[in-house]
Image: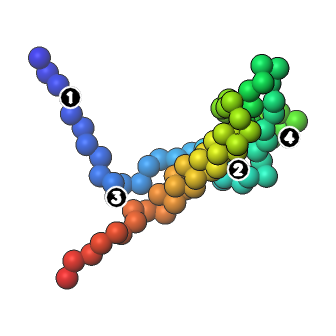
């Protein structure tokens, strides 16, 4: 049996398309989010489309509005970390 094994260095920069980068920058702005209530009583988080402002993309469903707000905050934090990583690796410790 033959196995293929590949590793990647954290210092290598990922190849991110300009469209993906534009989307991430759009998603990290809280003004581009909303919460809607569904007929079943759940709350749905949605972000606004970049091109068509009348279109919203659903992301998560939560039982409470507080849970939906937390889901938005977590999504914003997640994409902020992705954007931060594009600046290169963060040095956490150096040795003399």
Of marks 1 and 2, which one's residue comes earlier in the chain? Answer: 1
Q: Residue at x 77, y 19 (%)?
A: 40
Q: Which mark is residue 53?
A: 4
Circle 3 Cα neighbour tier, 10 Å, few/some/many (<14 / 14–19 / ≥20): few
Q: Secondary structure at mark 3?
A: loop
Q: Which mark is residue 4?
A: 1
**Quarter placement of the C terminus:** bottom left
**Distance Cα–Cα, label 2 vs label 3:** 26 Å
**Distance Cα–Cα, label 1 vs label 4:** 45 Å
Left/right of residue 81 with respect to residue 21 in the rendered view: left
Q: Which mark is residue 26?
A: 2
Q: Secondary structure at mark 1?
A: loop
Left/right of residue 2 with respect to residue 78 in the rendered view: left
Q: Residue at x 21, y 77 (%)?
A: 95
Q: Secondary structure at mark 4?
A: loop
**Distance Cα–Cα, label 4 vs label 3:** 37 Å
Q: Which mark is residue 11?
A: 3
Left/right of residue 48 with respect to residue 5 in the rendered view: right
User: Is the residue 38 above or below the residue 47 in the image?
Assistant: above
Residue ranking furthest to the right: 54
Of marks 4 and 2, which one's residue comes earlier in the chain? Answer: 2
Q: Depth check: give the residue in front, 2 or 37.
A: 37
Q: Depth check: give the residue in front, 41 or 2.
A: 41
Of marks 1 and 3, which one's residue comes earlier in the chain? Answer: 1
Task: Verify CB contact (< 8 Å) between mark 1 and mark 4.
Answer: no
Task: Verify CB contact (< 8 Å) between mark 1 and mark 3.
Answer: no
Of marks 1 and 4, which one's residue comes earlier in the chain? Answer: 1
Q: Residue at x 52, y 60 (%)?
A: 84
Residue 62 locus on image (x, y percent): 67, 31
The answer to whether any part of residue 91 appears in the image is yes
């Amino acid at each position: 049996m033959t196995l293929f094994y590949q590793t990647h260095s954290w210092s290598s920069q990922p190849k991110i398309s300009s469209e993906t980068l534009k989307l991430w920058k759009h998603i990290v702005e809280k003004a581009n989010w909303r919460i809607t209530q569904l007929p079943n009583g759940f709350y749905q988080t949605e972000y606004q489309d970049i091109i068509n402002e009348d279109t919203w993309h659903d992301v998560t469903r939560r039982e409470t509005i507080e849970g939906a707000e937390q889901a938005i905050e977590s999504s914003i934090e997640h994409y902020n970390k992705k954007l931060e990583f594009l600046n290169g690796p963060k040095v956490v410790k150096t040795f003399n």
